[in-house]
Amino acid sequence: MDRVIRLGMLGCGTVGGGVATILAREADDITARTGAKLELTRVAVRDLDRDRGLGLPSEAFTTDPEEVVAADDVDIVVEVMGGRDPAGSLIRRALELGKPVVTANKELVAHEGPELFAAARAAGVDLAYEAAVAGAIPIIKPMKESLAGDRVERVVGILNGTTNYILTRMTEEGADYEAVLADAQALGYAEADPTADVGGHDAAAKAAILASLAFDTAVHADDVFTQGIESVNATDIRVADRLGYVIKLVGIASEADDRVAVRVHPAFLPKTHPLASVRGSFNAVYVEAWATGELMFYGRGAGAMPTGAAVVGDVIDVARNLLQTVRGPTESQHRAKSIRPIEELSTQYYLLLDVEDAAGVLARVATAFGEHDVSIAQVWQEGGGDSAQLVLITHRAREADLRATVESVTAIDSVRSVASVLRVEAEVFDS
Ligand code: NAP
Ligand code: HSE
C-alpha cells in the first residue's frame, strides 16, 4: 500500500482533537478501509503555544489557515474551526483548488449551502458534512442516499446536545440553568458562543439542513422559526410532568402542498413519544416517510470523539472517491418551494401568567382568550397572594390567534407578565 492521502485541518479544538485522536489510534484499520494511508500533515489554529496533547509535530501547526488550504502536501481539507468567516472563504478556495472538503460547520452549510454545493459541483469534488447535524448520528447519508427512493413527509429531531443536556438535568435533578450550561461547556458540547445553543440557532441550522435534504429544496437558516430554552423555568417543567409531558427543544420540518414549514422551539412532548426518552447530550432524528413509515436515528449529538468519528467517516468516504476520481452523491435541490409562516401553525399551547390574586382576574383572562377564538382546555392557579400564577392549556389553536391573545392578556392590569408560552405537541406532531 503506497498511496498516501494528506489532510489539512482548519481548527484543532474539541472536534479537531477528536479527529486527530481517531486518525492516530485507528490508523491501520482506516488505511485498510480507505485503500490509502491518511496523514494529517497540516493544522491551523489560533494559539500555537497551547499543548494539545495529540502527538503531532509542532511543524504541522500554523496560524495561517490559507497556507493549509493552498499547501501542496494537502489533498483534502477538513474544516473544524467553525463560524461563517473565514471558514466559508477557505472552503471555497479549497474547492477552487480542486480539493475535496469535509466540514462539521452547520452554521455555514445552513446559510451558504447552495453556493458551496455549486462550487463543489463546478470543481468536481466532494463537500461532505455528516458531522454538521446531530454529531455522531449518521443522518446526512441516510437522508441523501438511503431514502432517495422514498418521499419524506416529516422530520422531528432533538438536534442540540447542549440544550438536551440542560433540560434533562433541570428535569431530573432540579438543577440550576446557569450551572448546567457551564457543565455543558466544560464537556465540549456547547458552541464557542453558547447562545447559539440555548437560543435555538444551532438546532435551527441543523433543521434547515435536514429540511433541504428531506424536501429536495433549499431551506435557509433564516427560514426556520426559532425560539430557545432561555426562559424555560422550573414551573414549566413541573407542569409538563404533572400533565404527562417532558419539555424538549425540538426541530420540526414538514411539507404540504409544496410549502415547507420548519420550526425549532421548546415543546411539551408526551412522555410516551420515542423522542421523550432521549436524555443528556444524546440527539435523535425521527423521520416519517411515505413508503418507509417511521424511522428513528439515535446517538450522541455532540462531543469530541462522537463528532470526530463522523468527520473521519466522511474523510474516508471522500478519500475513497479521490482515489477513484469520482464524486459521491450530491444534494438534490430541484424543487422550488415556499416557506409556510409560523402564524399558520395549529397546535395546543401552555401559558403561565403572573397575576394579581384578585376577584375577576380569571374572568378577564378567559374573555381575552374567547375574543381571539382560542379555547381553554384546562386552567388552574398556582400559589397565591403576591406569587399567584395562572396555568392555562389551550385546545388546538392557530399561532396567529394565540399571539393576539397573548397581546390582549398582557394588556390586562391584573396580569403582571406572561411568563411562559410553550407549544404542546400531542400524540401526533401538529401542523
Ligand atoms: P472549538 O473547540 O472552538 O475549536 C475551534 C478551533 O478552530 C480551535 O482549534 C481554534 O484555534 C481554531 N480556529 C478558530 N478560528 C481560527 C482562525 N481564524 N484561524 C486558525 N484557527 C482558528 O470548536 P469545536 O467545538 O471543535 O467546533 C468546531 C466546528 O464543529 C464548529 O463548526 C461546530 O459547530 C462544529 N461541531 C461541533 C460539535 C461539538 O460537539 N463541539 C459537534 C458537531 C459539530 P485555538 O485552538 O488555537 O483556539
Ligand atoms: N453545540 C452543539 C450541540 C454541538 O450542543 O449539539 C453539536 O453540533
Image (cartoon, rainbow, N blue to C red):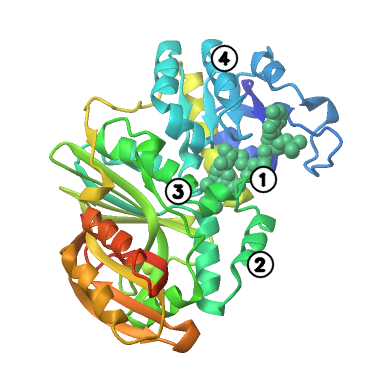
Q: CA distance from mark 2 to mark 3?
A: 21 Å
Instruction: Identify the residue at image location x=16%, y=48%.
Output: 290
Q: Measuring from the top left, give residue 411's x and y in whole percent.
A: 35, 64
Residue annotated with mark 4: 93
Q: Nearer the viewer, mark 4 or mark 2?
A: 2
Q: CA distance from mark 4 to mark 1?
A: 24 Å
> Which circle's residue, 2 or 1, is located before the other in the chain?
1
The outermost residue toward the front is 413
Split into 4 quadrants, where in the image is the N terminus? Answer: top right
Q: CA distance from mark 1 to mark 3?
A: 19 Å
Judging from the image, what secondary structure is the residue with disc 1 in? helix
Q: Is mark 3 within 8 Å of ligand 2?
A: yes
Label 3: few (<14), some (14–19) or many (≥20) C-alpha neighbours in 10 Å: many
Q: Measuring from the top left, give residue 283's x and y in whole percent.
A: 45, 57
Instruction: Identify the residue at image location x=79%, y=42%.
Output: 52
Q: Nearer the viewer, mark 3 or mark 4?
A: 3
What amino acid is labelled 3 in the image?
Ala
* Quadrant in the picture for residue 16: top right
What amino acid is labelled 2 in the image?
Ala
Q: CA distance from mark 2 to mark 1?
A: 21 Å
> Which circle's residue, 3 or 4, is located before the other in the chain?
4
Residue annotated with mark 1: 14
Q: Front-most of 66 and 97?
A: 66
Q: Is mark 1 within 8 Å of ligand 1?
A: yes
